[in-house]
Image (tube, grey):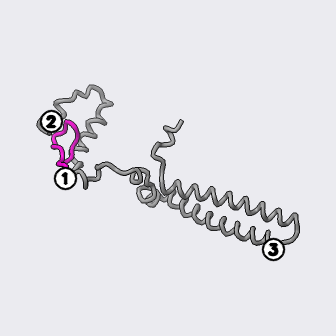
Amino acid sequence: RGELLGADWQRRYYLATSSDSLVAAYRVWLDRFSNGRGAVGSSIPAPSMNTRANSPLSPRTRAQLVERLESHTRLCVCCNTALQRAETLRTWACAAVLCALVAGLLLGHGSLKLAMCASALVCAAVAWGSSKLVAAAQVGSLVPPRNMN
């Protein structure tokens, strides 16, 4: 395959403007760091079918594509802190829901019971929102948000 595509991509492609320097730099980087994979038109030959399955460039499953926890959140200080805070908030909000419901059941007064049920509802909404934040930090969307509109 490498012989059909030409040995030297720099002779095959005409990069006319200075904005093409990024393309040339990418091709040089790809030739250097692709561990023998190369690119179409590259001087590096294509891999065999056996090496492709174990390659980091092999096709990914949907779960691997949208996985965000280990690929970003754990490595990013801001996102990791936000994840820890959201998990803590979710825990405390769930505990507050339970406390408010128990207090509402134990209290016999109408207005106080209503306030405890309202508090439980607000805490449940906070727990739900923080659960959504935790889920967003762990698994992303297959379609980027910028492409949703």
Q: What amino acid is at disc 1?
A: Asn
Residue 11 sits in quarter: top left
Residue lying at 19% horizontally and 49% vertically, measured from the top left: 49
Query: Alpha-carbon distance for marks 1 and 2?
Result: 26 Å
> Which is closer to the viewer, label 2 or label 3?
3
Q: In x, y percent, where is residue 141?
A: 48, 47
Q: Are marks 3 and 1 in contact (CB under 8 Å)?
A: no
Q: In x, y percent, where is residue 47?
A: 18, 47
User: Could you tell me which secondary element the residue under label 2 belongs to?
Assistant: loop
Return the residue at label 3: 106
Residues 77 and 108: in front is 108
Return the residue at label 2: 8
Give whichever of discs 2 and 3 has the lower sequence position.
2
Give whichever of discs 1 and 2 has the lower sequence position.
2
> Which is closer to the viewer, label 1 or label 2?
1
Q: What amino acid is at disc 3?
A: Leu
Magenta stretch contains residue 46: yes
Give whichever of discs 3 and 1 has the lower sequence position.
1
Furthest residue toward bottom: 106
Return the residue at label 1: 50
User: Could you tell me which secondary element the residue under label 1 belongs to?
Assistant: helix
- Against 26, is 76 above or below? below
Left or right: residue 70 versus residue 111 is left
Query: Alpha-carbon distance for marks 2 and 3?
Result: 81 Å
User: Could you tell me which secondary element the residue under label 3 belongs to?
Assistant: helix
Q: Quadrant of the C terminus?
A: top right
Q: Are marks 1 and 2 in contact (CB under 8 Å)?
A: no
- Against 109, is 32 above or below? above
Q: What amino acid is at disc 2?
A: Asp
Residue lying at 21% horizontally and 46% vertically, measured from the top left: 37
Q: Which residues are magenta?
A: 36-49
